[in-house]
Amino acid sequence: MTAIEPPALRAAIDLFNAGRYLASHELFDELWEASEGGDADFFKGLIQAAIALHHFQSGNLEGAAKLYSGHRRFLAAFLPHHRGLDVERFLGEMQRVCRPVLARGAATDVPFDPDARPLLHRFEERG
């Protein structure tokens, strides 16, 4: 299998940041299948984050809650940044946005706010 070039990662990030979680999942999946070594877990984490947010966006709060911990487990090994992405910031944004989903009662509806959605940011050195 040939390696996916960096443009595929940029495209997946752009789709994710546009709230097109299923489409970004497909590209992250291709990157995962083409990855070797530790990068496989990195892409698994991004896949799970995308699907968790897709579930949240679609109103499937149970599905979102189930996938939430998986993305954190996979991405924690890549703190604070990996492949140019600010993993630490992303995990913080995911926690902020998904906290109401995780803390809800059984009959509580939690609306998805597209303006507050987590984004994948490029890591910038802080000086």
Image: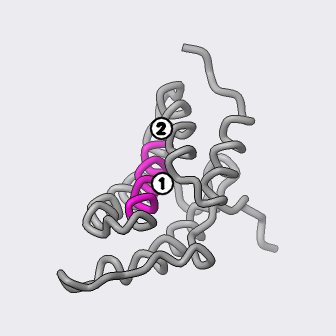
Above or below residue 35? Residue 79 is below
Is residue 45 positioned above or below 105 on the image? above
Q: Which mark is residue 21?
A: none
Image coords of residue 25 (percent x, y) = 50, 44
On screen, residue 106 versus residue 111, left or right, reads left
Query: Where is residue 90 shown, x and y percent of the image?
Result: 57, 66
Mark 2–mark 1 contact, CB under 8 Å? no
Q: Write the residue at 70% across / 43% down.
A: 11
Tell me, yes or no, whether the highlighted magenta stretch contains residue 52. yes
In the displayed structure, would residue 109 be above or below residue 57? Answer: below
Q: Nearer the viewer, residue 63 or 36?
A: 63
- Give the residue number, with chain letter if any, for mark 1: 50
Instruction: State the image coordinates of residue 103 (x, y, percent, origin top left).
Output: 28, 84
Secondary structure of residue under mark 2: loop
Region of the chain picked out in magenta, as a range? 43-55
Question: Is residue 115 or residue 88 the one in the foreground?
Answer: 115
Which quadrant would residue 20 be assigned to in this image? Answer: bottom right
Q: Name the quarter where the N terminus is drawn.
A: top right
Q: Residue at x 66, y 55 (%)?
A: 85
Residue, far right? 127
Q: Amino acid at mark 2?
A: Gly
Few, some or many C-alpha atoms within 10 Å of disc 2 (few <14, some 14-19, many ≥20)? Answer: few
Question: Disc 2 or disc 1, which is closer to the eye?
Answer: 1
User: Residue 64 or 126: which is nearer the viewer?
Assistant: 64
Numbered disc 1: secondary structure: helix
Name the residue tied to disc 2. Answer: 38
